[in-house]
Image (tube, rainbow, N blue to C red):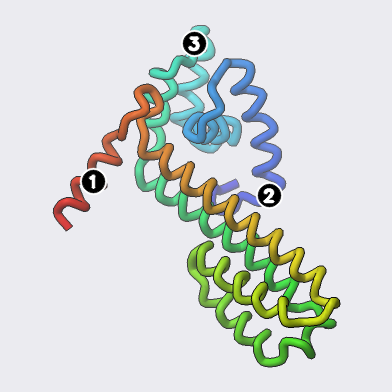
Amino acid sequence: MAEGKRDESFIAATARRALPLMVKHKVPPTPQNYQIWFEYAAGERDELVADIDARLAFGETFTEDVNRYLYEKHFTEREERELMEHANQESQRILKGIVRQLLSQGDLTSAYGDKLQEYSRQLDSATEVLDIQHVIADMLKETHEMTAQSRRMQQELRAATEQADALRKRLKETEKESLTDPLTGLGNRKAFNENLAECHA
């Protein structure tokens, strides 16, 4: 199965194989290490599979240096950016699904009228998780002016807001870790290059 066509069942099955392998070989559960072992378990990157198989055959310990070497050798900055973009798109997909489900509730149509269509348009044009949060905030504001029938919707919107906050924080943490050397805690070459580019902007 090509990487671009991985469905949820494939991802779940691969994760179930990858995590026990990381535990067995005492690999710390960092985002970078998880990516290495997820792809190893997926079996679609021949060079990565051969590299890890050879180390396993020799009984090599997966130290921090080894893990960092594997990541730097087999995963590029382009792939990191693609991973972040994929995570952002998945976060948007989840939140948009939640909000659209709320917007489609029949008992609220008469109360909102044209505003429902406006929220839908805003949702369609949203390109970031923060944009979706703004839509949720506007909907929450409106529901405060509605009758008791909207209380359940207010609770669901607040839950969606909390989920949006959690997703944004997770994205920021993942991005921060991709810019930090896992051994020293200092900025890595990628962070240095980005800072240098900002200075010349």
Q: Quadrant of residue 134?
A: bottom right
Q: Quadrant of residue 10?
A: top right
Direction from residue 103 to residue 166 in the image, left or right: left
Q: Residue at x 74, y 71 (%)?
A: 101
Q: Quadrant of residue 96?
A: bottom right
Q: Residue at x 59, y 36 (%)?
A: 42
Direction from residue 26 to residue 48 in the image, left or right: left
Give the number of the disc on residue 41. none
Q: Are marks 3 and 2 in contact (CB under 8 Å)?
A: no
Residue located beneath label 3 in the image: 61
Residue located beneath label 1 in the image: 195
The relative height of residue 176 versus residue 102 in the rendered view (above or below) is above
Q: Name the quarter where the C terminus is drawn.
A: bottom left
SS class, disc 1: helix
Residue 139 screen position, x and y as percent: 65, 76
Q: Amino acid at mark 1?
A: Asn
Residue located beneath label 2 in the image: 8
Q: Amino acid at mark 3?
A: Thr
**For marks 1 and 3 on the same chain, the one whose residue lies earlier in the sequence:** 3
Q: Residues within 10 Å of mark 2 (few under 14, many from 20)?
A: few
**For marks 3 and 2 on the same chain, the one whose residue lies earlier in the sequence:** 2
| Cα distance in 3D space between marks 1 and 3 | 34 Å
- Select label 2 or label 1 by which is in front: 1
SS class, disc 2: helix
Residue 59 screen position, x and y as percent: 52, 7
| Cα distance in 3D space between marks 2 and 1 | 36 Å
Direction from residue 148 to residue 5 in the image, left or right: left
Residue 23 screen position, x and y as percent: 63, 20
Q: Residues within 10 Å of mark 3 (few under 14, many from 20)?
A: few
